[in-house]
Image (tube, rainbow, N blue to C red):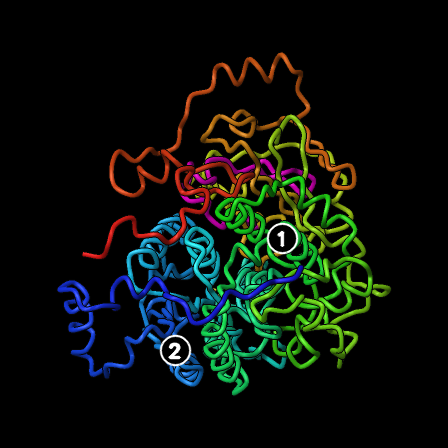
């Protein structure tokens, strides 16, 4: 696609606050001058909001204040005026009941922070899982020129001579303790080794997956996704992004120019190629909904079905983000997708160029970390979307992280009504369960939890683990951490709390899973299912006030991105009336 830059100079939106000699503009300029800015900072140059999700309680983004200084340097160099703005930071490892409940609140608040303030362009400083989609959603809904700078992944963890991945090894070690293969003391010793430095999870978890989504969408400079947080080149990337956003404002290169349907298709295929998180499905559907691209769950299956997973990273594979960076990072993946005819090469990026221009000459430095398309980790690596009477609106599974022998299976349902019920009974040796059963968890979707928690990868019962079994089929309306693995069917829609068929599964029902046929079937008659649904009464907790009420009342299904329905679409950046 050919982008035609706007004419420069022209009057920018920040001049509504700072241009002219009226009492109001004197008021706005005067207040900012109390920070020591000279007159010519208000001469119409681009004002760049560095939207920073730094927080002491979002440790994955704990280094973003330092990184912001490099962004500022780049903005100054390019003749812009940088202003750093703290924004809602929903930490994956801190927020309760789940950070996902606050993704939409963050997006809503940041959208208003952009629209209501004198910002001509935005640098989205993100990292931890929900920070990336929430800022992209806000940027899409306001449509001011925006560029993503992620904080980058942490360095490899090492424990007992083994490279250990954040998240992934937490799950592994936790199961090993239950199976009697690891002591509790060893598990405690592993704690600091797994999360070794500043940065986001070092696996291809949700943070790295969303960084890959931002780059493959064209919303970050080429190479951004994989540079480790503490590598000097991460700081260079920040400075270059600061320079670039100033030119983007001058050119009026907006999210709506970049976030086209082709860009989303590139991202879906990229997610398959990197073995990315299932969480990207809900986030990308939500971002598409903000920018008005008609993307559906079916597109994930259609676009991703034949995409091989070529990135050999945990949790699907062996290595960690450091090796991915040393091997060439995401540009190599995009190059290999392009060579295989799996990339829209002309999709525009923040560089102002087609995405292919940025990657067509890159080289791979380790073909075991980034495999060739002919020698993949998994031949069909995209997210599979299952449907059937148990999931009329769809459910998802990540085949690259699942057990091949369980991809077609018929098993007896062992049902947990909610996560508390699961926790109360899973370690009871009297629980009637074995490895052939299918674990079913209800009331953990967007309305039910509320917030769609990452509890879908329920730990296996100890009595099964002690047999050396490490995987069973699990079905829920929850999500799963991007660092997790297993034959886990997620995002079942409609969710149980909305009266979906998942709500009426009973202990002893037989369930059929066939991933190749994309089938998820509850083996009861249509009449029986209809009667159970007619008799169903909700059992989840319902909030009566506050944000929890707003969320439960207005959140959409996982199959449409779990956004608040009234936030869908682009509302632009017009303040509506003159400032003040
Ligand atoms: Fe924040 Fe993984 S928990 S990036």
State whether residue 389 is above or below residue 472. above
Side of 417 relative to 408 (left or right): left
Residue at coordinates 51% horizontally, 58% vertically from top-left?
A: 255
* Res. 180 visible in picture: no
Return the residue nearer the eye: 51 or 76.
76
Q: Secondary structure at mark 2?
A: loop
Query: Which residue does the numbered mark 2 point to in the structure image?
Result: 80
Number of on-image labels: 2
Compared with 331, 101 (above or below) is above
Residue nearest the viewer, comparing 161 with 363: 363
Determine whether, in the image, residue 74 is placed left or right of residue 490.
Answer: left
In this rendering, the answer to whether 283 lies above or below 275 is above
Does any portion of residue 419 appear in the rendered image?
yes
Residue 341 x, y percent position in the rendering: 81, 59
- Specify start and end residues of the magenta stretch as a single range: 431-459
Q: Is residue 17 left or right of residue 534?
A: left
Q: Which residue is mark 1?
A: 264
Report if residue 222 lies within the magenta region.
no
User: In the rendering, at what x and y percent does residue 208 appear?
Assistant: 57, 66
Q: Secondary structure at mark 1?
A: helix
Other residues around mark 2 within 10 Å, as few (<14) / some (14–19) / many (≥20)? many
Residue displayed at 38% across by 59% down: 90
Q: Earlier in the sequence, mark 1 or mark 2?
A: 2
Looking at this view, is 574 or 194 the one in front? Answer: 574
- The kind of secondary structure the magenta stretch mainly shows is loop
Tell me the quadrant of the picture where the C terminus can be found: bottom left
Q: Nearer the viewer, residue 34 or 278?
A: 34
Q: Quadrant of the N terminus?
A: bottom right
């Amino acid at each position: 696609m050919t982008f035609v830059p706007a004419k420069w100079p022209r009057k920018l939106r920040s001049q509504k606050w700072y241009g002219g000699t009226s009492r109001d503009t004197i008021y706005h300029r005067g207040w900012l001058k109390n920070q020591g800015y000279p007159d010519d900072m208000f001469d119409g140059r681009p004002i760049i909001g560095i939207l920073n999700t730094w927080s002491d309680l979002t440790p994955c983004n704990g280094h973003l204040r330092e990184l912001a200084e490099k962004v500022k340097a780049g903005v100054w160099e390019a003749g812009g005026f940088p202003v750093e703005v703290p924004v809602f930071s929903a930490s994956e490892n801190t927020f309760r009941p789940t950070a996902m409940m606050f993704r939409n609140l963050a997006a809503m608040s940041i959208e208003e922070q952009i629209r209501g303030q004198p910002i001509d362009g935005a640098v989205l400083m993100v990292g931890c899982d929900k920070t990336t989609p929430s800022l992209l959603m806000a940027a899409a809904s306001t449509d001011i020129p925006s560029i993503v700078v992620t904080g980058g992944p942490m360095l490899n963890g090492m424990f007992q001579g083994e490279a250990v991945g954040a998240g992934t090894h937490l799950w592994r070690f936790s199961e090993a303790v239950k199976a009697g293969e690891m002591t509790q003391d060893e598990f405690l010793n592993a704690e600091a080794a797994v999360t070794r430095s500043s940065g986001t999870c070092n696996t291809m978890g949700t943070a790295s997956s969303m960084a890959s989504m931002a780059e493959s969408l064209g919303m970050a400079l080429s190479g951004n996704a994989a540079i480790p947080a503490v590598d000097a080149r991460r700081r260079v990337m920040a400075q270059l992004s600061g320079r670039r956003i100033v030119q983007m404002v001058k050119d009026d290169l907006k999210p709506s120019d970049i976030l086209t349907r082709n860009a989303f298709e590139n991202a879906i295929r990229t997610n398959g190629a990197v073995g990315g998180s299932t969480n990207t499905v809900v986030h990308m559907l939500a971002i598409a909904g903000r920018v008005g691209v008609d993307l559906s769950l079916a597109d994930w299956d259609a676009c991703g079905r034949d995409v091989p997973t070529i990135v050999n990273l945990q949790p699907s594979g062996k290595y960690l983000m450091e090796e991915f960076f040393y091997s060439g990072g995401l540009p190599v993946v995009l190059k290999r997708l392009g060579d295989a005819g799996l990339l829209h090469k002309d999709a525009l990026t923040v560089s102002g160029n087609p995405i292919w221009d940025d990657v067509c000459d890159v080289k791979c430095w380790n073909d075991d970390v980034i495999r060739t398309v002919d020698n993949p980790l998994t031949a069909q690596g995209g997210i599979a979307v299952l449907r059937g009477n148990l999931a009329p609106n769809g459910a998802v599974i990540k085949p690259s992280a699942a057990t091949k022998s369980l991809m077609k299976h018929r098993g007896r349902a062992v049902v947990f009504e909610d996560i508390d019920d699961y926790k109360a009974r899973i370690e009871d040796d009297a629980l009637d369960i074995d490895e052939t059963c299918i674990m079913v968890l209800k009331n953990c979707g967007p309305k039910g939890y509320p917030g769609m928690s990452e509890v879908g990868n329920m730990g296996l019962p100890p009595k099964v683990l002690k047999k050396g079994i490490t995987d069973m089929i699990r079905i829920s309306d929850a999500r799963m951490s991007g660092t997790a693995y297993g034959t886990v069917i997620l995002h079942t829609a409609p969710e149980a709390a909305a009266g979906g068929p998942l709500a009426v599964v009973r202990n002893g029902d037989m369930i059929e899973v066939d991933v190749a046929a994309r089938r998820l079937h509850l083996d009861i008659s249509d009449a029986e299912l209809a009667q159970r649904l007619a008799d169903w009464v909700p059992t989840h907790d319902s909030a009566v006030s506050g944000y929890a009420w707003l969320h439960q009342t207005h959140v959409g299904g996982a199959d449409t991105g779990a956004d608040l329905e009234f936030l869908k679409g682009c509302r632009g950046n017009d303040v509506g009336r003159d400032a003040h």
